[in-house]
Image (spheres, rainbow, N blue to C red):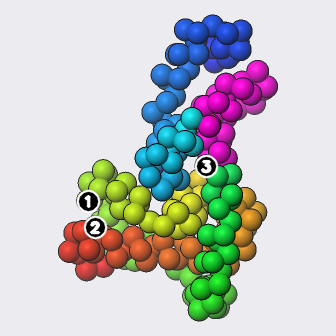
Amino acid sequence: MTERELVQKCVSGNSEAQKYLFTRYAGKLSAICRRYAADEDEARDFFQEGMIKIYTHLSGFKFQSSLETWMTRIMINTAITAIRRRKHIWESMDAHDGYLHNVVSSGSEESDDEMFDNNPSVYESLDPARVIEIFNELPPGYRAVLNMYVIEKMSHKEIAQVLGISENTSKTQLLKARKKIRELVQKHYSINL
C-alpha cells in the first residue's frame, strides 16, 4: 500500500489502516518523544498528544514530504510546545548563566565538530541503552537544546526562536549539556575525559 493510499484509508475511517499506521510508526515516534521527555510518563503524554494531532490533521497532509517526516515533525513540535510551556525553566536558567553567557559571547565555545573533547572513541564504545539513560539524566533544558542542536541539526538562532529563549541561552544550555554528559560518563564508567 502506498503512503497516499494509507492516508486516504485512514482519513476515510478505515480502522485497519489506522492500526497499520500506528503500528508502523509508533516505535520511531515514541523514541523521539523519549529524547525530549523528562521521564517515561512525560514521553507517553507527548506521544499520545502527538498521535491525536496526527490523526486529526492527517486529512491536511499534502504529500510534500514523506509521511514519516511529517509525523516526526509533529512529534517534535508537540514536545517542544510542552517544553515552551515551562518557560520559567528558561528564565531561571538565564538568571544563573551570566558567566557562561560571557564565555559563549567571547567566542570560546567548543567547536561544533568536537562534541566530546578529543576522545570520541570512548563514547562510541558505550552501550546504547546506557547512553539513553545518561541522556535522560540531563535536566529538561539541556536535553531539549541538545536534541534540537545535535539530532535535529537546528541552529542556535532556530532553537532560540522555537523555545522563546535567547541564542546565548541556547548556546549555554548546549555547553552545560556537554559538560554534564562528560560528568555522567566519568561517574558511571570511571573514565577520565
Crowd class of label 3 (few under 14; some 14 to 19; many from 20; radius 10 Å): many
Which quadrant of the rendered structure holds the N terminus?
A: top right
Q: Are marks 1 and 2 in contact (CB under 8 Å)?
A: yes
Span highlighted in magenta in the image: 49-78
Q: Does 77 sit above or below residue 101?
A: above
Give the overall secondary structure of the magenta segment.
helix
The residue under the point 41% across, 60% down is: 135
Residue identified by numbered label 2: 122
Disc 3: which residue:
79
Q: Is residue 65 magenta?
A: yes
Identify the residue position indicated by label 1 in the image: 125
Query: How far across and down, in percent of the image, does residue 28 sit?
Result: 48, 36
Of residue 152 and residue 141, the one placed in the foreground of this image is 141
Q: Closer to us: mark 2 or mark 3?
A: 3
* Residue type pointed to by label 3: Ala
Residue 58: percent from left, percent from top: 72, 24
Q: Secondary structure at mark 3?
A: helix
**If you read the primary sequence from the N terminus, does the residue marked by circle 2 or circle 3 appear first?**
3
